Image (cartoon, rainbow, N blue to C red):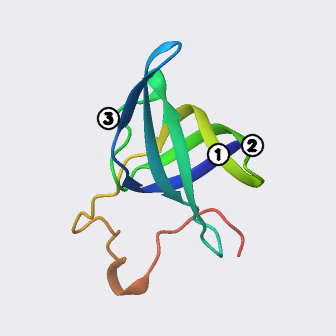
Amino acid sequence: MQLTAKLIQVLPLQTGAGKNGQWKKQDIIVETETTYPKKICVSVWGDKIDASQLQTGNQLKIDFDVESREYNGRWYTDVKAWKIELAAPASVSAAGTTPAPTEMGIQEEDDLPF
């Protein structure tokens, strides 16, 4: 599955050692930009973590898998990213970037018949 969302929070890096060696996991909180925005916690594991992309405000394109597991009669769901790309950098407001209105409201002439 794929999702494009704005990064709103980076949680602390988690590390540890397991039977397969050292591991690291970074949880991030993203927010969809739809009519009804949703916040989603996405887990990024191991070498998929790129700190340069994980800047608050960045627009990210995230490829992920959703997996649920049962433990002691309760179900837990994980959203695990397997690829993250920068969709758009954090927007920086720049003064004067809006186009100036044409003089006296007269638009440039074009070839349209209407």
Look at label 2 and name its amino acid. Answer: Arg
Q: Is residue 20 above or below residue 87?
A: above
Q: Which residue is mark 1?
A: 78
Say which quarter of the image contains residue 104.
bottom left
- Furthest residue to the left? 95
First reached walking from the N terminus: tag 3 or tag 2: 3
Where is the C terminus found, in terms of image quarters?
A: bottom right
Local crowd size for mark 1, using a 10 Å CA cut-off: few (<14), some (14–19), many (≥20): some
Q: Are marks 2 and 1 in contact (CB under 8 Å)?
A: yes
Judge by depth and name the residue closer to the eye, 20 or 27.
20
Position in image of residue 68 (x %, y %): 75, 45
Judge by depth and name the residue closer to the eye, 109 or 19.
19
Q: Between marks 3 and 2, how big is the CA–CA gap?
A: 31 Å
Q: Which residue is mark 3?
A: 52
Q: Residue at x 29, y 64 (%)?
A: 97
Left or right of residue 102: residue 36: right
Q: Between marks 1 and 3, how big is the CA–CA gap?
A: 24 Å
Position in image of residue 31 (x %, y %): 53, 62
Q: Residue at x 47, y 75 (%)?
A: 107
Query: Which one is closest to the eye, mark 1 or mark 3?
Result: 1
Q: Which mark is residue 44?
A: none
Q: Between marks 2 and 1, how big is the CA–CA gap?
A: 9 Å
Q: Which residue is mark 2?
A: 69
Local crowd size for mark 2, using a 10 Å CA cut-off: few (<14), some (14–19), many (≥20): few
Judge by depth and name the residue closer to the eye, 15 or 28.
15
